[in-house]
Amino acid sequence: MKIAIISFSQAGYRLSEMMYWVLKERAYEVNSYTKSKYTKKVMDESQLDEDSRDFRNVKDFAKPVDESIKEWTGRRFADSDAIVFVGACGIAVRSIAPFVKSKKSDPAVVVVDEQGKFAISLLSGHIGGANELAEEISEIIHGQAVVTTATDLNEKFAVDVFAKKNGCYISDMELAKEVSAALLAGKEVGFASDFPWLGEIPDELKLSENEEERPELGIYVTSGYMEHPFVHTLYLIPRVVTTGVGCKKGTPKETVERVIRKACDELLVPSVAMEQVASIDLKKEEEGILEYCKERNLPFITYTAKELEETEGTFAHSEFVEGVTGVDNVCERAALLGSSREGKGRLIRRKYAEDGVTAALAMKKWSVKF
């Protein structure tokens, strides 16, 4: 998590210094800033005692903010996972107001008073992780975490926390709100999964199996939109699919994109289910594939012909492909090999070919965690 801390007073500066060093020691990426003329006194090394100068270089600790807080906040919304304001809630609220957009994309925002009494989760408590960060900061400063999300206060299952923990995409945030509201009201919410699970299913969720009567509203963990186990189904999509790709040299990104999309359409697999794209090392500089992956922030991994050839399974055979690459099939073998890093994966969509591009889909072994 990339955290930005900003302080507005001398006391706040000292408190932010404590958080900065402890969070860095805990492997967070932390940047600290200050917006106060009073902190210049603190940043003057000549005023520190000998022990303080030996302990750390305070001059390098916090960056002065010369721009407006609004401008600074806008930059942090773009480049940070979390923002910690050490000061009044009003400053934080006015600063973030122009940039708040969505639970799915907004960074976590935590406010800490300059005396270190409270660490308040202000924005993106669940998906963004502000609740957890507020708890961690309160422990660092020996203060009290303030968390106001209803599911936490009532100790109910929180679908957005569950989705984040499992790395799942939430298909419909409005429906997710309905799920939370139903759970808080004590109503029945169903649960179904195409994957096995570890741990106990919470009492608030009703496991829906076979032909038994199901609640109208439910959660479904799946890799695609083929099934509809509930009248109102909230889909949680984990990133478990490796897309294997082969293509002619110089194939444009638009063609690669179209063929992969068609390969996915048969199973209604959304792009958010993709974990990575895989191919043979002959294609490691293939511009069309690289552009496709860059647009979607997907890793592109490649294997040698020998690695692909040694992949066990039954695959479509092409003498032409074998003559060019040294292996009889690229897309299926690459997809399966890429999905087998954490246990044996399986092909869910065999080779689809069009316009000089081949694509196949494989799913890794994965479990839901409660």
Image (cartoon, rainbow, N blue to C red):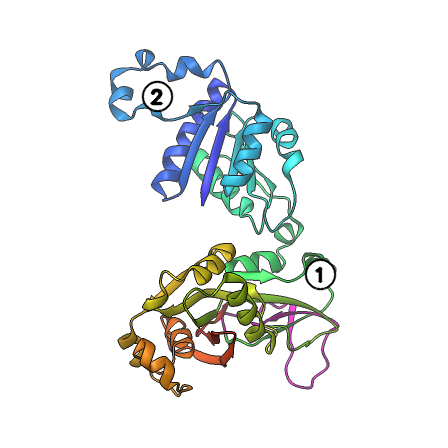
| Whether residue 292 is situated above or below residue 78 in the rendered picture | below
Q: Position of residue 248 (x, y in %)?
A: 43, 71
Q: Is residue 60 left or right of residue 125?
A: left
Q: Name the residue that disc number 1 marks.
A: 175
Question: Label 1 is placed on what type of residue?
Answer: Leu
Q: Secondary structure at mark 1?
A: helix
The answer to whether residue 327 is seen in the rendering is no
**Viewed as shown, does residue 54 lie left or right of 285?**
left
At which x and y percent is residue 68? 57, 23
The amino acid pointed to by label 2 is Lys
Image location (x, y in percent) of residue 3: 46, 39
Q: Which residue is mark 2?
A: 59
Q: Is residue 120 left or right of residue 39?
A: right
Q: Which residues are magenta?
A: 197-223
Which of pointers 1 and 2 lies earlier in the amino acid sequence?
A: 2
Indicate whether residue 47 is drawn in magenta. no
